[in-house]
Image (cartoon, rainbow, N blue to C red):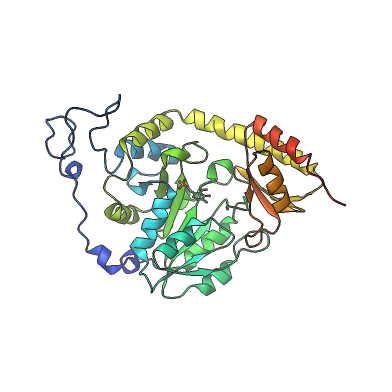
Amino acid sequence: MAFDLKALLRPHIANIKPYSSARDEYSGKEGIFLDANENPFGSATAEDFNRYPDPYQWAIKEKLAIVKDVRPNQIFIGNGSDEAIDLLIRAFCRPGKDNVILLPPTYGMYEVSAEINDIQIKKVNLSADYQLRPDAILAATDEFTKIIFICSPNNPSGNKVVREDIRKILENFKGLVVVDEAYTDFSDEPSFTTELDQYPNLLVMQTFSKAWGLASLRLGMAFASPEIIKILNLIKPPYNISGLTQQKALEALEGKEKMESLVKDILLEREYLWQELTHLEFVLHIYPSHANFLLVKVTAARKIYDFLIDSQIIVRDRSKVLLCDDCLRISVGTREENVALIKTLKKFPVVG
Ligand SMILES: Cc1ncc(COP(=O)(O)O)c(C=O)c1O
């Protein structure tokens, strides 16, 4: 099915003249900079942050391109993945007219962003084993459907989505398919970034918040065709990633082994937690996880949640979420944290 990016884009966006920042107009590093109304003397902090940062974060993209095996112009860096989600909706969906397809149970920000932008939401539930129903998804699309959001590994279920199902949607939908891979580093499934050149309607999202351990920096990545990336760059705030964040991201990318070792630790702890949870009488099912959390079906989710809170152990009660009845979502902690969790759970009074 032919993909026509220009037809998909909101018409007025195609004609927007982007804000031209001082750093856009002159990007050289040497000189006397009197063009951006910065403070020439320094900063009110020990370290200086008085100069505006690179609006396109090229140093990060050069390094990230090597790590992810893509080209720098296929990368967008956002203030968390949430910025990319919002920009995509604003670029492609006309308020009050267009719609997006969401696949519950899934990550909540797609719905929030769509609602904020007054975009209609069509929901096609996942199957009981949290897989896509490609035919139902495709049947739900209409001429106003602009984006389908797929999350793999999925939050809150933790499973990876069958690759062929995603391909079927990419091949039969003329809008944009977003594959959110926030948890990809905890999975053995290759990233969909390897298929970018094959599918012009594919955008893959990843984040520095999970495997890289940088949630506080707010740094999300989107990978797509240079044409789609150009659109995101056109409508983003000029300096969306702070200089400090850029500095830290470069530091992280230079020490990729640290991230790999963090992932290894989490995978070991995920296995430990899994093993320990299976021994608990009130644990009914632990869903297979390709992420850094476990979705656990228990006999009395709210009671167990409250019981843990009393010991200042906080998990996520997902029992009100579709297809997640009586489920808790437990992030994998350190060994110490996991031991404390299990120790407390063992004290939960099972009735009957
Ligand atoms: C599926 C998914 N995507 C994106 C995010 C958010 O990522 P970021 O911290 O980059 O905004 C989360 C956070 O929990 C998530 O679960």
Q: Is residue 57 left or right of residue 124?
A: left
In this view, the residue farthest toward the front is 310
Q: Is residue 176 visible?
A: no
Quadrant including the N terminus: bottom left
Picture mark count? 0
The extreme right residue here reads 352
Q: Nearer the viewer, residue 107 or 174?
A: 107
Nearest to the observer: residue 175 or residue 296: 296
Give me the residue at 52% from left, 60% from top: 167
Which residue: 75% across, 38% down? Answer: 276
Query: What x and y, as percent, mark residue 115?
Result: 44, 65
In the rendered image, residue 45, in percent from the top left (x then y), is placed at 29, 27
- The image shows residue 72 at horizontal and vertical percentages of 34, 43
Where residue 64 sits, quadrant-wise, is top left
Residue in the image at 52% along x and 57% along y: 108
Please tell me which residue lies in front, 155 or 34: 34
Using residue 242 as the reference point, say whether residue 325 is left or right of it: right
Q: In the visual, does 155 lie left or right of 30?
A: right
Q: Residue at x 51, y 47 (%)?
A: 182
